[in-house]
Image (spheres, grey):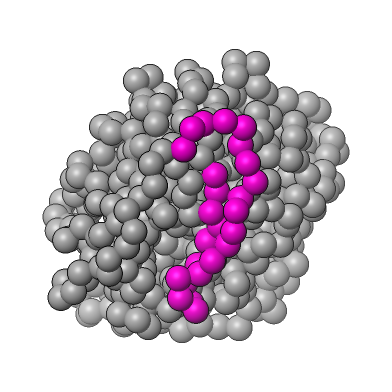
Amino acid sequence: MAQAQPGRDTFIFLAPAPAPQNTEAASKQKSPQRRRSPVVAAPTGDAPAVKRKAPTTASSLPPPPLNPALAGVALDPSWPKQLFVISDSVMLGAKPALSSGMPGWQVNFMGRPALMIPKAIGELPGSVGSIAVVALGYNSLWYKDRKDFQRWSDYFDKGAEDMLAALKRRGAKKIVWVLLRELTAELLPNNGTASMQYSKYSWYFPYVNERLRALKARHPEMALADWATAARQPGITYDAIHLNPKGAELMVDVVRMAVGLEPRPPRAITTAETPPPAVPPSLRGTDPPATLPADQGPTATKAPESDPEPPPLPVGPIAKPTYAFRDCAKCPEMVVIPAGSFMMGSPDGEADRSPGEGPQRQVTIPRPMAVGKFEVTFAEWEACASGGGCKSNPSPGDEGWGKDRQPVINVSWDDAGEYVKWLSQKTGKAYRLLTEAEWEYAARAGTTSPFAAGATITPEQANYQTNFNEDGSKREGGYREQAIKVGTFAPNAFDLHDMHGNVWEWVADNWHEDYAGAPTDGTINAGGDTSMRVQRGGSWYSFVSEIRSASRHGDQPDHRGADIGFRVARGL
């Protein structure tokens, strides 16, 4: 049972006591059998996001045998069964699995994406219990130009020493640090996000583990959890880094072994089926019908009659938005944006461009349309849940950042589909997600530069992850480390807020590796990878290159995360 405890991003899991036949010999460590792990699947939120039938597959490869050189001080059976985990993205996906994976233990999990060592030390509770597991600080060694790497290495070493000392002062009798996965191309799932992560980050992951092994040499009592070895198999992450259900279960066993417990026997693990290729009607096209499709609208009544849609407007200079409205008191505020044409994708010379942002092509949005002025908020999501919709995820976690005008997070593409279905039923209007082309048209708002604000962008204009300065002592501009209230920054020329950063926004399209053969009329790009959907705009956790107007990202449709939200659209 999960019990919320005071403090941000902190959860206590009180697991049931183990059955007598599973009593763990805490001081004994056996060499386990090999077991294998996965690729897509369960979200990080509290409620299941997978609405399809979920088959089970037996795990077959256990974690590798424990390397005695990494073991650290032996687990004392007399210690209280208390496990404190502090993590960034590397281990966040294992949070739900720890409650069942450590029976009889009190597990206190604290963490969030991009959590750095100095910040984490400042947020430690007064007592951490007998065992502390650390899975963060890895970003300290990343710098895209690889400048002055020794200085960065020294910065990491100092932070790691400070963390060990802080945990010991707070009562930790044994400290485990998780080694980082070392990436090779054959381990990656076939999606654009994994490829991007591999190209950006894989070079420095071995350096991280080198520094952790040096830390271990200075502190023989510390243990290293050998995720570097255990993760040398495909099918355990959504992308290159973030754990899916099989990866989460494997991570739990790797941690158990590093703590001094035996791995669990092989067992069945539930995974999601590949999503069907059909796209729900409420998420298609650029101009939805005036009446709702039968499978997406009200079951007992038809949508009210509406005027026929106007003929396509001639394409000319992009005009300013015309007006804003709401279809109900708790509906999203919508802005009517004009018809127009634009160049979709990035030019070859744009900094940080990826091949998936081309080939550039002219796209015409033939009619005005209504687009959410803001990302959908928690208040709007809660109206859906209380109104009988959003049943698969009625109460997404807010990570302790608040609700109300915060953008709703921890929502999947499937969840977004439930919201637009409910909103359509409530209003009699055919709400949907934007197509990828519509999204970029709305984000650019008549501009051709990397950002709607121009060639560059600052933390005073968007919420994103800023780089460190040369000596690694601080960020180049403020980094908020969380999603913030919608509308905090000035809008673009279409009066739309937060099109750059804050949260990734789901759009309707399946993932395509590039724009070859893509339509030029703003409609959904048919076909593609039916197991992936597109996200646009970047988030508070994204670097500046990922929040450009042309940047794009692929993700599993049932994946939820603290940096994922959406906005809505409808025809007029």
Q: Is residue 324 magenta?
A: yes
Is residue 80 depicted above or below 323 in this figure?
A: below
Q: Quadrant of residue 570?
A: bottom left
Q: Quadrant of the N terminus?
A: bottom left
Q: Is residue 472 left or right of residue 238?
A: right
> Please, what is the dominant secondary structure of the magenta stretch?
loop
Q: Nearer the viewer, residue 134 or 388?
A: 388
Q: Quadrant of residue 333?
A: bottom right
Q: Nearer the viewer, residue 17 or 23?
A: 17
Q: Nearer the viewer, residue 545 or 374?
A: 374
Q: Nearer the viewer, residue 97 or 285?
A: 285
Q: Quadrant of residue 437?
A: top left
- Residue at 25% across / 59% down in the picture? 291
Q: Residue 507 location in percent, x, y?
A: 42, 47
Q: Quadrant of the C terminus?
A: bottom left
Q: Which residues are magenta?
A: 313-338
- Residue at 79% across / 30% down in the picture? 150
Residue 147 appears anywhere in the view: yes
- Residue at 34% across / 59% down in the picture? 307
Q: Is residue 163 left or right of residue 59?
A: right
How many numbered callouts? 0
Q: Is residue 251 magenta?
A: no
Q: Residue 420 location in percent, x, y?
A: 35, 62
Residue 138 appears anywhere in the view: no
Q: Residue 446 location in percent, x, y?
A: 63, 35
Is residue 404 depicted above or below 412 in this figure?
A: below
